[in-house]
Amino acid sequence: MPLLVNLLIGVPAIAVWESALWYAAHGHCGLDDLDRPDLDGCTYPEIDHSGPVLLFLVITGAFVLLLVLIADVLLPLRRERPLRPWLLTLPAVALPYLLLLGSAG
């Protein structure tokens, strides 16, 4: 059961990882960077989208963190079950993203 729950949490975590990757690559761009020849890919759409992508990243990241906290810590404690199986399967959250990367290549 803990493995299935963490795999399901991994589905919305895909949006977190993708937006974090986009923001790491393009979120640094500002209007002053448009004329710099050493920065590739700084365009007006990337500058316009960096704010909403950061907001989306914060909201979805907080949502996934809340899901992990509830499913892997609070519910087992409330039901007086051991935390160990839940925390040991926590890396399974990354599995849906890794499967997506593997199928896209």
Image: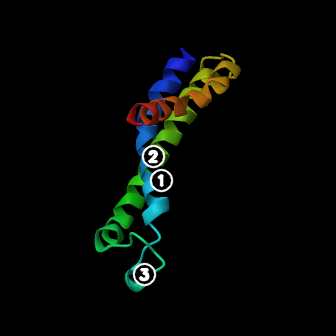
**Residue in the picture at 33% in, 65% down:** 49
Whole-angstrom CA distance, mark 1 to mark 2, is: 6 Å
Q: Residue 16 carries which label?
A: 2
Q: Of callouts 2 and 3, which one flags the residue occurring earlier in the amino acid sequence? A: 2
**Label 1 belongs to which residue?**
20
Does dot 2 land on a helix, a strand or a loop? Answer: helix
Cα–Cα gap, marks 2 and 3: 26 Å
Q: Name which of mark 1 and mark 3 comes first in the sequence.
A: 1
Residue at 44% across, 83% down: 36
Q: Which of 105 and 91 is in front in this view?
A: 105
The answer to whether 6 is drawn above or below residue 19 in the figure is above
Give the residue type at disc 3. Asp
Give the quadrant of residue 29.
bottom left
CA neighbours of label 3 inside 10 A, class few (<14), some (14 to 19), many (20+): some
Residue 11: x and y, percent?
42, 32
- Scheme of colours in the image: rainbow
Horizontal and vertical percent for residue 90? Answer: 61, 29
Quick check: marks 1 and 2 in contact, CB under 8 Å?
Answer: yes
